Image (cartoon, rainbow, N blue to C red):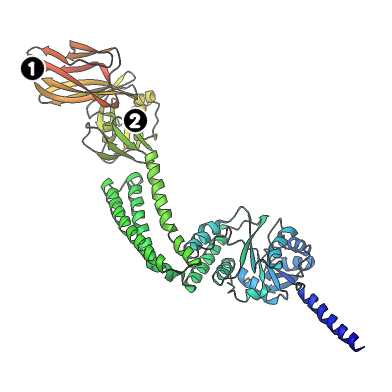
C-alpha cells in the first residue's frame, strides 16, 4: 500500500505537468464604438457572434441620438452608454476598462461587409502567440486623412513605421499590453497606439482582411479627424524625442527646401504670373539656386556627422528617412523643369517654352536684339472703330512674325496696316471682321505664341526697310512649314543698307523691282543662289546671299524686293 500511495503521488505530478503544458484558454472581447449607427450596428454584432473564439461583445454607445443602443441590445451585445459624445478614443477606453477578457479587438460599427473570417483574421495571430497587437489593412475608397496627414508626418518623425494603413481603425491587442498604451480621447487613438507600440518595442503586425465598405465621412469630419491625427503625431514626436533628434539637421534641410521652393517660385512667376516682371522671376530663381546649393552642402556634411554618432535600430531608419521631404522637393523641381522642357519647341531660330499662360522665348539666332523674353498668350478682340483696314498687334507677336509697325499684311484679298496695341491692353490682338473670318477667329479666342505662325500661315507681308536714306519693301509670307534659312545683305553703291533673312522655294524665280519696274531676277535651283548685281540708273545694287545652318518660317515672295525712289538720291 505504501508503494501504491507513492505511485499515485507520482502520477498526480505527471498529470499536473501534462495539464500545465497545454495553452491557457484566452478569452476574447470585442469592443464596438458606435455613434448614431442604428442601421449597421446590429449586423456587425450578429457577424461577431458567429466567431467561435469571441466570448464577449461590448457596444459603447457614445452619446448617440438614434436607436443605436436599442439595436445593439436586441442583437445580443452588452451596451455601455455615454451621456454625451466623447469621441472614438474615449469610447474605446471605456470598452477596454469594462472588458473582462485577455484579448480585446476593436471594430467599427459602420462596416457593411464585415464577415466572421475578417474578425478571426484580426484575432488569430495573437491567439497563436505571433504578436501582441494586430492592426488591419484593407481595400477601401477612403483614406484621405491617412495619405494627406498621417503618412507624411509618420515618414518624417517615425519613418520606421511603414504600415500601409496606420489609421485602419480595426485592431486587436492583449489587454495587459494595452495598459502600457496612452489612449487618446479622439480620432488620434489609432495612430497613438501604433506609435506607442513601435517606440516601446511591442510586437505589432499588420493583417490584410480584404475589402471593407465604410460609410464615407463628410469633409467637416475629415477636417476634425486630420487635426486630431496631426496633434497626436506631433505630441508623440515631442514626447519620444524625435523633434530633438532631427533638429540639428532639420534646420539645414528646411533651408534647402526653402531654396528649392524659391527656384520653383521663380520659375512659376516667369511662366504664370503676368504682373511680376521677368527679371524678378529670374532673380528669385537665382537666389533660390544659391541658397539651395549652400544648404544642401550643409545637409551632406551634417548628415555624415550625425550618422556616425547615431545608434543602430529604428533611430537609424528615422534619420535616413528625415531626408525624404528634401528628396521630394528635389523631385518636384526636376519634374517642373522637365515639364517646361517638354513644352519647348524650336522654331524660327528660337527656343520657345510654352507650358501654359506665358511663353518663355530664348533666341538662338542673330535676327533679334532680345536674347530672352516672355510672350503671349494673345486675346483676339474687335478692331477699333474706324480702323477697318488696321490690325493692332502686340509687339511680342510682331517679333514672332518678323513684322514691324506700318508693315502691310494681306489676309485673303484685303490689305491691312500693322499698328501697335494700346498701352493698357498689351496682349490684345485687334482684328477687323473680314480678317477674323478668313483666319477662322472669334472675339475672345486665346492664341499661344507658338500658334501665331499657324494662324497667319500663307498671309503675305510687305515689310519696309528705311535705312541710310534707302527705302525698299521686302515681300514674304508666313509658313508653318520650316524652310532652309538664307541671310542676305542689300548693298547700294558699296554700302550695306540692310540685312535680312528668309527661305526660298526650289525652282521659283524671284524678282527685284524699283518703283514697280523690273530690274532683274534670280532662280533658286538645286538649293543654290548666285549673288545678284544690278543697276538702277547710276546706282549699283548688289544682293549677297549666305546659307546658314538654321530653319525659318519666313518664306520670301516672288516679288522679292521693291526699291522706292532710289533715283531721287
The N terminus: image quadrant: bottom right
- Residue 193 visible (yes or no): yes
Across and down, in percent, residue 87 comes to 61, 69
- Residue 426 appears in which quarter of the rendering? top left
Across and down, in percent, residue 385 comes to 30, 30
Tell me if residue 288 comes above or below residue 432 in the rendering: below
Give the residue at mark 2. Answer: 452
Q: CA distance from mark 2 to mark 1?
A: 39 Å
Q: Residue at x 56, y 63 (%)?
A: 225
Q: Nearer the viewer, mark 2 or mark 1?
A: 2
Q: Toward the viewer: 176 or 275?
A: 176
Q: Toward the viewer: 550 or 451?
A: 550
Q: Is residue 340 left or right of residue 493?
A: right
The C terminus: image quadrant: top left
Give the residue at mark 1. Answer: 568
Residue at disc 1, secondary structure: helix
Q: Dot 2: few (<14), some (14–19), or many (≥20) neighbours within 10 Å?
A: some
Residue at disc 2, secondary structure: helix
Q: Is residue 511 left or right of residue 536?
A: right
Amino acid at each position: 500500500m505504501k508503494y501504491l500511495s507513492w505511485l499515485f503521488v507520482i502520477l498526480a505530478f505527471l498529470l499536473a505537468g501534462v495539464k500545465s503544458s497545454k495553452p491557457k484558454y484566452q478569452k476574447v472581447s470585442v469592443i464596438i464604438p458606435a455613434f448614431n449607427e442604428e442601421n449597421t450596428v446590429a449586423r456587425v454584432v450578429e457577424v461577431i457572434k458567429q466567431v467561435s473564439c469571441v466570448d464577449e461583445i461590448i457596444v459603447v454607445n457614445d452619446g448617440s441620438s438614434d436607436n443605436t443602443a436599442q439595436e445593439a441590445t436586441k442583437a445580443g451585445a452588452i451596451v455601455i452608454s455615454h451621456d454625451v459624445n466623447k469621441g472614438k478614443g474615449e469610447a474605446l477606453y471605456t470598452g477596454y476598462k469594462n472588458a473582462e477578457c485577455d484579448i480585446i479587438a476593436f471594430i467599427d460599427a459602420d462596416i457593411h461587409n464585415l464577415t466572421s473570417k475578417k474578425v478571426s483574421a484580426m484575432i488569430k495571430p495573437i491567439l497563436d502567440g505571433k504578436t501582441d497587437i494586430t492592426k488591419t489593412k484593407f481595400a477601401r475608397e477612403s483614406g484621405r486623412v491617412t495619405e494627406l496627414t498621417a503618412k507624411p508626418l509618420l515618414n518624417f518623425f517615425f519613418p520606421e513605421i511603414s504600415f500601409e494603413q496606420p489609421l485602419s481603425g480595426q485592431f486587436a491587442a492583449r489587454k495587459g499590453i494595452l495598459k502600457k498604451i496612452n489612449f487618446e480621447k479622439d480620432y488620434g487613438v489609432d495612430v497613438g497606439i501604433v506609435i506607442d507600440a513601435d517606440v516601446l518595442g511591442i510586437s505589432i503586425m499588420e493583417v490584410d482582411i480584404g475589402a471593407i465598405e465604410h460609410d464615407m465621412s463628410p469633409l467637416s469630419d475629415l477636417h476634425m479627424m486630420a487635426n486630431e491625427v496631426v496633434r497626436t503625431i506631433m505630441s508623440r514626436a515631442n514626447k519620444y524625442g524625435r523633434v530633438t533628434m532631427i533638429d540639428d539637421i532639420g534646420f539645414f534641410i528646411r533651408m534647402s527646401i526653402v531654396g528649392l521652393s524659391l527656384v520653383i517660385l521663380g520659375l512659376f512667376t516667369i511662366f504664370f504670373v503676368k504682373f511680376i516682371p521677368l527679371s524678378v522671376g529670374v532673380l528669385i530663381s537665382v537666389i533660390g539656386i544659391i541658397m539651395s546649393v549652400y544648404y544642401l552642402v550643409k545637409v551632406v556634411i551634417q548628415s555624415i556627422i550625425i550618422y556616425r554618432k547615431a545608434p543602430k535600430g529604428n533611430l537609424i531608419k528615422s534619420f535616413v528617412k528625415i531626408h525624404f521631404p528634401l528628396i521630394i522637393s528635389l523631385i518636384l523641381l526636376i519634374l517642373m523643369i522637365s515639364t517646361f522642357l517638354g513644352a519647348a519647341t524650336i522654331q524660327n531660330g528660337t527656343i520657345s517654352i510654352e507650358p501654359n499662360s506665358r511663353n518663355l522665348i530664348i533666341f538662338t539666332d542673330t535676327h533679334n536684339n532680345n536674347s530672352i523674353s516672355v510672350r503671349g498668350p494673345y486675346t483676339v478682340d474687335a478692331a477699333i472703330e474706324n480702323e477697318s483696314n488696321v490690325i493692332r498687334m502686340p509687339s511680342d507677336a510682331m517679333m514672332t512674325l518678323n513684322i514691324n509697325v506700318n508693315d502691310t499684311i494681306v489676309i485673303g484679298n484685303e490689305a491691312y496696316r500693322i499698328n501697335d496695341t494700346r498701352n493698357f491692353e498689351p496682349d490684345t490682338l485687334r482684328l477687323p471682321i473680314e480678317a477674323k473670318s478668313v483666319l477662322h477667329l472669334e472675339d475672345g479666342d486665346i492664341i499661344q505664341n507658338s500658334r501665331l505662325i499657324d494662324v497667319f500661315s500663307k498671309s503675305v507681308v510687305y515689310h519696309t526697310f528705311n535705312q541710310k536714306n534707302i527705302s525698299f519693301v521686302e515681300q514674304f509670307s508666313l509658313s508653318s512649314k520650316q524652310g532652309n534659312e538664307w541671310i542676305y545683305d542689300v548693298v547700294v553703291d558699296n554700302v550695306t543698307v540692310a540685312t535680312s533673312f528668309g527661305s526660298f522655294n526650289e525652282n521659283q524665280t524671284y524678282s527685284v523691282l524699283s518703283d514697280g519696274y523690273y530690274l532683274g531676277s534670280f532662280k533658286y535651283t538645286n538649293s543654290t543662289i548666285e549673288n545678284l548685281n544690278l543697276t538702277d540708273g547710276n546706282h549699283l545694287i548688289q544682293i549677297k546671299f549666305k546659307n546658314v545652318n538654321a530653319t525659318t518660317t519666313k518664306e520670301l515672295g516672288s516679288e522679292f524686293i521693291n526699291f522706292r525712289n532710289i533715283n531721287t538720291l
